Image (cartoon, helix red, strand yellow):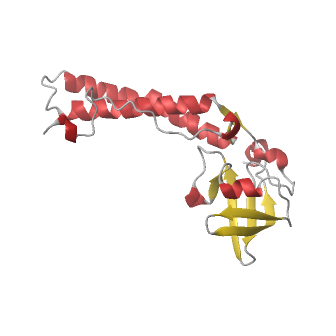
Amino acid sequence: MSKAFTKESESGDDDDEPIVPPLPGGKNYITPLGYRALRDELLQLIDEERPKIVDIVHWAASNGDRSENGDYLYGKKRLREIDRRIRFLTKRLEIAEVVDPSVHLGSDQIFFGATVTYREDGDVERTITIMGIDEADSAASQVSWIAPVARALLRARIGDEVALPTPGGTRHLEVIDVRYPAPQGALEQER
């Protein structure tokens, strides 16, 4: 088959960096737990996974013909993926600005890290937590602080109504409740 019909580059390297949208103001806000999770993933890749794959590639290379050696080919590909993820995590952690949302404990105003319950257009209640870009998980009702709903809610207080412009028209959100996590030290003392 002609190389014109393959997606691989001529060198075989897949070193394209993941496309990350620019951050507003160049800030990468993240909670202490999110920062710890990214750091733990980075250390796990560097200390555990990468050395295992390097050993597999070394063993496979010593077996001779590399052109049809699945362990070698897969290992090299996996090594590139790991190295790409290590570079990505390193860059994200370098620009991370850790913000502890517990400093706002007891506040009725919405800031980064708040868990917000709001009523949408007067009838549907939703609860979201405003998190960092690298830690938000929509399946867990977490949204990034740059998401339109988070941007509309930031700085609002309990009882405020904010407008959320959407492609289908403007939606009105009424803030019902705002909660913040307890300080980490308090959680550790309870255990």
Q: Position of residue 149 (x, y in %)?
A: 69, 58
Relative to 113, 75 lies left or right: left
Q: Which residue in the rendered view is the most extreme toward the bottom?
A: 123
- Indicate left or right for 61 with 128 as reference: left
Q: Position of residue 137 (x, y in %)?
A: 57, 54
Q: Residue at x 16, y 26 (%)?
A: 66
In the image, residue 161 sits, relative to residue 38, either above or below, namely: below
Quarter of the view holding residue 162:
bottom right
Q: Residue at x 27, y 40 (%)?
A: 7
Q: Is residue 80 above or below residue 158?
A: above
Residue 31, position as x, y percentages in the image:
69, 42
- The image quadrant that residue 124 belongs to is bottom right
Number of labels in the image equals: 0
Q: Please provide percent x and percent y for residue 167.
A: 61, 64
Query: Looking at the picture, does residue 16 appear above or below residue 119?
Result: above
What residue is rendered at 30% in x and 25% in y? Answer: 55
Residue at 39% across / 29% down in the picture? 50
Who is closer to the viewer here, 84 or 47? 84
